[in-house]
Amino acid sequence: EVQLVESGGDLVQPGGSLRLSCVGSGFTFSNSWMSWVRQAPGKGLEWVANIKKDGSEKYYADSVKGRFTISRDNAENSLYLQMNSLRAEDTAVYYCAGDFACTYWGQGTLVTVSS
Amino acid sequence: DIVMTQSPDSLAVSLGERATVNCKSSQSVLSTSNNRNYLAWFQQKPGQPPKLLISWASTRESGVPDRFSGSGSGTDFTLTISSLQAEDVAVYYCQQYYSAPITFGQGTQLEIK
């Protein structure tokens, strides 16, 4: 059974930083593109970033470029999202998604940016 | 960026009737190298993560009921539910994965009439 488990979500002040993690199992993590997708309360889905199987290519949404960094550790079947200079509009549930077409999804972790 | 526009924003259909959701991309998501449309459909129920229903515009994922089908090519796509069931109440999203940034449609809320 495929599982993706996110962690690291929290309440953080504007301008603060947070690191999200996602651990995958039940599929070949090292052979899969991985993405972060977020969903603000009551809103639609917004793709945030993705990373190639070997980490050699990374892409970001304009809304997070320069502030967020995606990375992975295939030895640990883990995906990360380092989020800096957080803004109120970054408040959302952050999902980890596996495979190029986002075939697999975790349950999400809530990030709240507020003073 | 490729903009994905869904229609309608919301839809109410009677049980057992057909439901149709449309998705239009601002540029083609058809690859000329492999003749595949990089278009997916997702279903999201309240409090749950999205679930992939269809990839490559028309390939149903394992375990997805055959009342769900996808069609279209290039810039115009359709998700059809042939006979609506109560458990199909959800928000449906299209997504292009042809080029970065990956983009989603705004979502279509499907309800029972």
Image: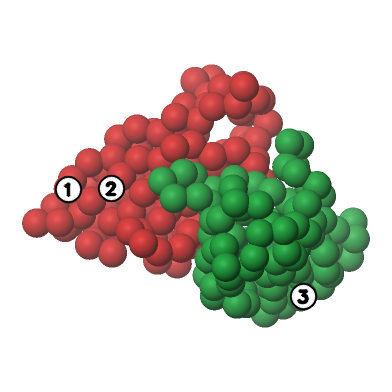
Which chain is the one coloured green? Answer: B
Q: Is residue A98 above or below residue A84?
A: above
Q: CA distance from mark 2 to mark 1?
A: 8 Å
Write down the chain letter for disc 3.
B
Q: CA distance from mark 3 to mark 2?
A: 35 Å
Write down the chain letter for disc 2.
A
Looking at the rendered structure, whether the residues under marks 1 and 3 are on a common chain is answered as: no
Q: Is residue B7 above or below residue A9?
A: below
Tell which of B63 and B18 is nearer to you: B18
Looking at the rendered structure, whether the residues under marks 2 and 1 are on a common chain is answered as: yes
Give the mark toward the camera: 1 or 3: 3
Give the mark toward the camera: 3 or 2: 3
Name the colour assigned to chain A in the rendering.
red
Looking at the rendered structure, whether the residues under marks 3 and 2 are on a common chain is answered as: no
The residue carrying mark 2 is: A111
In the rendering, which numbered label is found on residue A12? 1
- Secondary structure at badge 3 equals strand
Mark 2 or mark 1, which has the lower sequence index?
1
CB atoms of marks 1 and 3 within 8 Å = no
Amino acid type, residue under disc 3 in the picture:
Asp
Percent across and percent down for residue B109 are 53, 66
Please give the name of the residue rendered at 73% of the width and 42% of the height, measured from the top-left corner.
Answer: B64
CB atoms of marks 2 and 1 within 8 Å = yes
Location of the N terminus of chain A (image quadrant): top right
* Side of B61 where B44 appears, left or right: left
The residue carrying mark 3 is: B76
Please give the name of the residue rendered at 73% of the width and 36% of the height, measured from the top-left corner.
Answer: B63
